[in-house]
Amino acid sequence: MPYIAAFKKCMASDQKICVASEVGTLRRLLIHSPDRGLGKVIPSKAQDWLFEDIVHLKTMRRDEYDYYVKILLYFLDPDKIKGKLAAIDADKTRDFYKPDNPSYFKSDKVIDVQRLLAEILEDDSIRTKLIATICGIERCSYRTQEQLNAFDGNELAKILISGSLPDDTMLFAPLPNLIFTRDIGITINDHILLNKPAKAARTRESILAQYVFFNHPIFGQYQQNLIEIPDNEHHFLMASDANTDFTRSTLEGGDVMMVSPRHLMIGCSERTTIYAAQQVMRLLFDKNVVDTVTIVKIPKKRDYMHIDTVFTQVKRNMWVLLGDIARQGDDAKKRDALHFFAQPNKDEELKILQFNKGWEHKPTEIENLEDLLTDISKNDLGSQEPVQFIYSGNNVFPFGAREQWTDSCNLLAIKEGVVIGYDRNDKTLEAFKAAGFEIIKAADLLERFERGEASPDTLTDTFIMLPSAELSRARGGSHCMSMPILRDAIV
């Protein structure tokens, strides 16, 4: 099949970009550390800026997100951190984590989007065009454009992301959601699908990502593999309230999962429309990138948002998911007296359709999520072991819903069977422990690595707990906070 040739090319040893599964060993990804803009989110604007709450920035950075970075570096680029942890932690300035600082770790495997943006802004032509573009959408004055042009690339990148000048003067709204780099794009074999945000608050974020992907040398040899989603050709004639899935083209990366070399999953959710999913399917089939696309329509609820907030993959034969939208959820609702008063709502039902290239007009309907995920594990990934499901909150009412809200289902597989997630979801962690996983705090694991008592290469079946008191307020977990661009093939 055509996708096989594309996959073999993707997995060539010199490739810098290739993702063909959710659980192959992670080699390279894009992140973005919490920036000063997050500290300027106020209650009256938080939801307008798509942020759920205000956060304590210092705690989020030093006590939580920094552990995420350290774990990623130890697995993906250990030379940057191994044997240096005590000195890094003792430095109160945190210069190691700041992309604009000479002491920054500057890894080519754990890559901050801010660093890439700063590097392309050293080009005068790109700088001029991007400043004009951003000032246009933000309705800035001409004098502001001239003011921005006076900053060097590092500072200008910080301003365009945070929305504020070095003296804390705010020019425009911050981009608090940029820490969720999954949403700016998704790697599909050796292609990158750029997002098309549903909300105006993410427009500047999308433009910055677009400039990075089309102009940074990392992506230079992949220019023909960058996929932009077209608008409805008549979108400019539509009424401003024409917001149905059949006319709008919006998609975010949290609704896209590359589950095997041949198979892409797209969620239709609060943020991703059916029209966009259809456009992506058509483009990928035409380019022979995949030969199967499964559309998973989930209820349009704020607490679900994207498909990766209700399920993610742990191993080729293991998934974590929310029981309320699964087969188990149906059984639980029958037992739960609280659902007696609930009226059924067709718009809140899960619906799964699978499309194969050449048979796009004859999709197969799949009854429930477990059947779909079992089929992927067995037939796409060749698992010979029984497929296992870990349910949010151990599927115990009301902990399933409570812990899904704090990202129990949003896990990043660093390698097969080794995931990183939040420390606060106790019942879900109990379910992982019962399934044979070691549950360990990020800080404790890092100490083991430093003492030579454990190695990322030999670690198996482990849930790494990330401190999350502030991070969980943002409504996004470790899966959201990553955009993998290179993973090993599953063998």
Image (cartoon, helix red, strand yellow):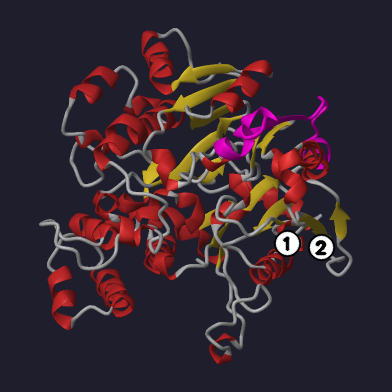
Query: Furthest residue to the bottom?
Result: 237
Q: Residues within 10 Å of mark 1 (few under 14, many from 20)?
A: some
Of badges 2 and 1, nearer the viewer stands 2
Q: Residue 20 at x, y = what percent?
A: 65, 45
Residue sitting at x 51%, y 32% = 421
Image quarter of the C terminus: top right
Question: What kind of residue is marked 1?
Answer: Asn
Quadrant housing residue 173: bottom left
Q: Is residue 56 left or right of residue 368?
A: left
Q: Is residue 181 left or right of residue 254?
A: left
Element type at mark 1: loop
Q: Residue 444 at x, y = what percent?
A: 41, 15
Q: Which residue is mark 1?
A: 288
Q: Is residue 14 visible?
A: no
Q: Residue 298 at x, y = what percent?
A: 69, 55
Q: Is residue 176 visible?
A: yes
Depth order, front residue of 68/465: 465
Image quarter of the N terminus: bottom right
Residue 93: assigned label: none
Q: Residues within 10 Å of mark 2 (few under 14, many from 20)?
A: some
Depth order, front residue of 294/176: 176
Element type at mark 2: loop
- Tag 2–tag 1 contact (CB < 8 Å): yes
Quadrant housing residue 110: top left
Q: Residue 405 at x, y = what percent?
A: 54, 42
**Magenta stretch contains residue 382:** yes
Q: CA distance from mark 2 to mark 1?
A: 9 Å
Question: What kind of residue is marked 2?
Answer: Lys
Residue 357: assigned label: 2
Residue sitting at x 35%, y 38% = 107
Q: Is residue 105 left or right of residue 294?
A: left
Query: Which stretch did the figure color magenta?
Result: 374-403
